[in-house]
Amino acid sequence: MADNLSQSFDKSAMTEEERRHIKKEIRKQIVVFALMIFLTLMSFMAVATDVVPRSFAIPFIFILAVIQFALQLFFFMHMKDKDHGWANAFMISGIFITVPTIAALMLLLGVNKI
Amino acid sequence: MATQKQEKSVIWDWLTTVDHKKIAIMYLIAGTLFFVKAGVMALFMRIQLMYPEMNFLSGQTFNEFITMHGTIMLFLAATPLLFAFMNYVIPLQIGARDVAFPFVNALGFWIFFFGGLLLSLSWFFGGGPDAGWTAYVPLSSRDYGGLGIDFYVLGLQVSGIGTLISAINFLVTIVNMRAPGMTMMRLPLFVWTSFISSTLILFAFTPLAAGLALLMLDRLFEAQYFIPSMGGNVVLWQHIFWIFGHPEVYILVLPAFGIISEVIPAFSRKRLFGYTAMVFATMIIAFLGFMVWAHHMFTVGMGPVANSIFAVATMTIAVPTGIKIFNWLFTMWGGKITFNTAMLFASSFVPTFVLGGVTGVMLAMAPVDYLYHDTYFVVAHFHYIIVGGIVLSLFAGLFYWYPKMFGHMLNETLGKLFFWVFYIGFHLTFFVQHLLGLMGMPRRVYTYLGDQGLDAFNFISTIGTFFMSAGVILLVINVIYSAFKGERVTVADPWDARTLEWATPTPVPEYNFAQTPQVRSLDPLFYEKIHGDGTMKPAEPVTDIHMPNGSILPFIMSIGLFFAGFGLIMLNMDNPIINPWIVAIGGLALTFGCMFVRSIKEDHGYHIPAEQVKADLAELKKGGN
Ligand code: HEM
Ligand SMILES: [Cu+2]
């Protein structure tokens, strides 16, 4: 299997199909990126102004954070893609370990705080 | 003149190598050096404790030794020694030509090495860290902890990066580089346990890095995460530390399990009993390993509910561990057992590990832990796990893989003598420490009063340490003696073993496999011995083999990180010779500069032509290999 990966190509080695796919992907990522900036702005606004009631501000930005996290995982960490089984397995086990750990940690520290 | 030139090129070769086999040997050497260093500290501590009110070490030196002994043993001795075997064996066992990212592999080694060097430099700047390997705040806070703690924080931070990237490399290698037919459920157990251990590194070293970063901010930049008088929380450090610290134990012990699971079947002449159960038991242990960290903190005052939950969770780990113990016993049951040195170490691992496990379950009972906490009972417990588990399995692995790695056997007579001296010394040292603990001797004290019933056992314990030291000296003699007089090995398979690493010729060529093997079963080599002609079938024709070029960049990048860390430490020095920021930023610039060079400079590696590979193969045929 003499590989020709080490030679450089003049033209793109991608097929038309692949290039169309990449273009679509880029468009999606830009949209999601803009959305994420918008979410960030919303959370700043929520804290800086009184648009969102004081008492609801923290749960509100928390919800926004969860949405951002999901977007990040699905679009930028490629969890939505097929052929991504191993990476997804690791991300899922990471979440599986982190969420209970952080939940337990918050409970424990809450208990300790006097 | 000629010889000098020769020598220089050998050193250059090792500094720039990206070959997993050479990196493995560098890990082995570096790990052994650190192991001996920390072992000498242990010996000195035991001499100090030999008689009541001894004046061999001062209290301050004892504290520094205790901290450095624990830190070095875990981060700079046990981990790299396991990485040495992983690096050598994983690509061979899965039928690969190298790890997935050879450059990153070299980088991981050098970063670990320079991180360790940074930590060790503390001796020249007013003494080592002295807050224990756990570095609990407030002892390690900027108000109470000296410069040594800064070396601890940044040395571990740097060497942790090395460990982390090596682990990621192993993960990708095992996922992507397996030979045709090598499915996940045909992986040798050493590969499986290394895989899961690497996952644990990925998930556990990240909290450690975060915790160390917070402590660094506290110490260098007047942050207040852990300073109660400023609204910080000291217990938070304990949680973060043990969220890392407990999995760390499994990071070390799982590959040790893997070594045992390779050696026992090979010398019992039977396949491993309950392969699937072994794999799933490993996964369950790994998961539970994350959810039990607070059992180190029962006495912090978490309250009865939290204590009970963590106690029960801890005890459940005994179940999958028990599965593994029984599977090893069933593997030996009815086998034709050869008790050579490797097998002696592997089989004696089982009872000592069980003993450590039993005391572990005792410690897991929260009310009882109030009694044992911070006594020598704990010291005895974790040394039964660490020495009776990890170190014994490292010795088993050393004797087992030595002929493949170095082309000659270790002497068996010396080996067996080493085993008995070490094993007897181990039990002498640590068994009586259980009793010392029950009698109330606290841990981490540099001396004790006489006539309290502690004298005899402390004396026995120190005598045991002399035995262990003698054992290690025997091992060193064995290594030197065998290098000159040892039985040469040119056959591929001196043990008549079962897995793929024994299908490669000895010495292993730089490309490992001339042709990628076709795997048809679990224990592939053994399968071919029974069902085929005893050699692996190739999965591809002989073609040019693409190899990566060596590179000095990993070495330079690591030096950069070393200076980045050292510069930050200089911030806390009283009168640094030059501005610390110059050193820190200069170091980072060096590292990033190398990354930049690496990114823009095209480096396609080279090819070993097919003719050469064919010639090698013919040569082997002639040798009757
Ligand atoms: C082989 C001979 C060894 C001897 C004689 C020995 C001896 C000791 C001694 C005297 C202590 C201090 C106990 C105390 O007062 O709390 C200690 C602590 C410790 N040892 Fe060892 N040790 C050995 C091997 C190892 C190994 C191989 C490891 C790990 C890979 C290890 C890890 C530790 C740790 C983590 C601590 C706790 C340090 C601390 O409290 O900060 N030891 N050892
Ligand atoms: Cu633990």
Image: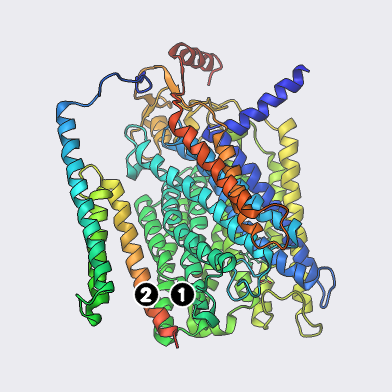
Residue B330 at what x, y percent from top left? 44, 55
Residue situated furthest front in the rendering:
A49
Residue B259 at what x, y percent from top left? 51, 48
Instruction: Say whether mark 1 and mark 2 are on the same chain.
Output: no
Q: Residues within 10 Å of mark 2 (few under 14, many from 20)?
A: some
Q: Are marks 2 and 1 in contact (CB under 8 Å)?
A: yes
Residue B46 at what x, y percent from top left? 76, 67
* Gap in angstroms between the C-alphas marked 2 and 1: 10 Å
Q: Chain of mark 1?
A: B
Looking at the image, can residue B338 be seen? Answer: no
Q: Quadrant of ligand 1?
A: bottom right
Can you identify the residue that label 1 sits on? B294
Q: Amino acid at mark 1?
A: Ala
User: Is residue B43 depicted above or below A9 in this figure?
Assistant: below
Q: Is residue B248 left or right of residue B68?
A: left
User: Is residue B608 depicted above or below B549 in this figure?
Assistant: above
Q: Residues within 10 Å of mark 1 (few under 14, many from 20)?
A: many
Q: Amino acid at mark 2?
A: Ala
Q: Residue at x 25, y 74 (%)?
A: A49
Q: Which mark is residue B503?
A: none
Q: Chain of mark 2?
A: A
Residue situated furthest right in the rendering:
B55
The C terminus of chain A, quarter of image: bottom left
As rendered, which of A51 and A104 lies closer to the eye?
A51
Q: Secondary structure at mark 2?
A: helix
Can you identify the residue that label 2 sits on? A104
- Asked whether mark 1 and ligand 2 are closer than 8 Å, the reply comes as no
